[in-house]
Image (spheres, helix red, strand yellow):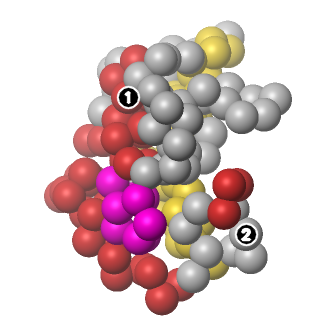
Amino acid sequence: MKTIIQTENAPAPIGPYNQAVAVQGELLFTSGQIALDPKTGQIVGTTAGDQTKQVCENLKAILTASHSDFAHVVKTTVFLKNMNDFSAMNEVYGKYFGESSPARSTVEVARLPKDVLVEIEVVALIY
């Protein structure tokens, strides 16, 4: 069974997709999150570090709404506009995932929605 996850504490989708989808009440797949403020719809931050913080706050809201958290994330994919921003992103990312860091892929891409610097998607266990 597939359950659509929607919370007002994270940005509304800007296209034909959902914030996240839960499968069988066990796995959660989020859409890629960018640094949008859920209240204003505006991009937060001009640096990769600042944007990563907002991205993680958006992911936190979706995880919470889905009965999960960062400790239950098993895989992330990070998309960076510039791989030179890896250290700045990684410093903030580490504060959210800590010692329970999941498997991760990080790739540089030519462009991201709304020309942000960072986008992150996660797969998590629902507890």
Identify the disc placed on residue 72.
none
Q: Is residue 127 visible?
A: yes
Magenta residues?
45-53
The number of discs equals 2
Amino acid type assigned to the residue bearing label 1 in the image: Ala
The crowd level at tag 2 (other Cα within 10 Å; few <14, some 14-19, many 20+) is: some
Residue 85 horizontal/vertical position (percent): 45, 81
Amino acid type assigned to the residue bearing label 2 in the image: Arg
Q: Is residue 79 magenta?
A: no
Task: Please tell me which residue lies in front, 56 or 24.
Answer: 56
Q: Residue furthest right?
A: 16
Q: Measuring 33% from the left and 54% from the top, which residue is drawn there? A: 53
For disc 2, the marked residue is: 111
Q: Measuring 61% from the left and 74% from the top, which residue is drawn there? A: 81
For disc 1, the marked residue is: 61
Residue 43 horizontal/vertical position (percent): 51, 50
Name the quadrant containing residue 37: top left
Q: Which of the image's four quarters has the N terminus? A: top right
Say which label, 2 or 1, has the lower sequence index. 1
Q: Which of the image's four quarters has the C terminus? A: top left
Q: Secondary structure at mark 1?
A: helix
Residue 77 horizontal/vertical position (percent): 55, 59
Identify whether 124 is placed above or below 88: above
Q: Are marks 2 and 1 in contact (CB under 8 Å)?
A: no
Q: Measuring 34% from the left and 76% from the top, which residue is drawn there? A: 88
Q: Secondary structure at mark 2?
A: loop
Task: Please tell me which residue lies in front, 98 or 60.
Answer: 60
Identify whether 22 is placed above or below 102: above
